[in-house]
């Protein structure tokens, strides 16, 4: 699961931890990547995941 726009979290009424917990109720093994294209946070992890999927 990709959660984008995490750079906006300080300005929004959004509970990231609760979101991830709800997703894990549905799929306990879900891979979660939180990223921000603006700051670059999480982009390396996402690119590595994409690369791994391409080789699988």
Image: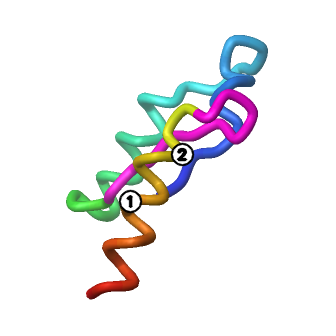
Is residue 39 inside the magenta stretch? yes
Residue 38 within the magenta-colored segment of the rendering: yes
- Residue furthest to the top in view is 10
Residue 26, image x and y in percent?
34, 62
Please tell me which residue lies in front, 44 or 25.
44
> In terms of secondary structure, what is the magenta stretch mainly?
loop
Give the residues in magenta. 31-40
Which secondary structure lies at badge 2?
Answer: helix
Q: Which mark is residue 48?
A: 1
Residue found at x 44% / y 32%: 18
Q: Residues within 10 Å of mark 1 (few under 14, many from 20)?
A: few
Q: Nearer the viewer, residue 40 or 34?
A: 40
Local crowd size for mark 2, using a 10 Å CA cut-off: few (<14), some (14–19), many (≥20): some
The residue that disc 2 covers is 43
28 vs 34: above or below = below
Quarter occupied by residue 5: top right
Left or right, residue 21 beside residue 34: left
The quadrant of the picture occupied by the C terminus is bottom left
State left or right for residue 15 relative to residue 33: right
**On screen, residue 10 above or below 40:** above
Compared with 46, 19 (above or below) is: above
Determine the CA span between mark 2 and mark 1: 9 Å
Residue at the spot 65% in from the left edge and 36% down from the top edge: 36
């Amino acid at each position: 699961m990709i959660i984008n726009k995490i750079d906006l979290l300080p300005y929004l009424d959004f509970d990231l931890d609760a979101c991830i917990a709800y997703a894990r109720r549905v799929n306990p093994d879900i891979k979660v990547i939180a990223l921000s294209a603006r700051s670059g946070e999480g982009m390396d992890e996402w690119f590595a995941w994409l690369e791994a999927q391409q080789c699988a």
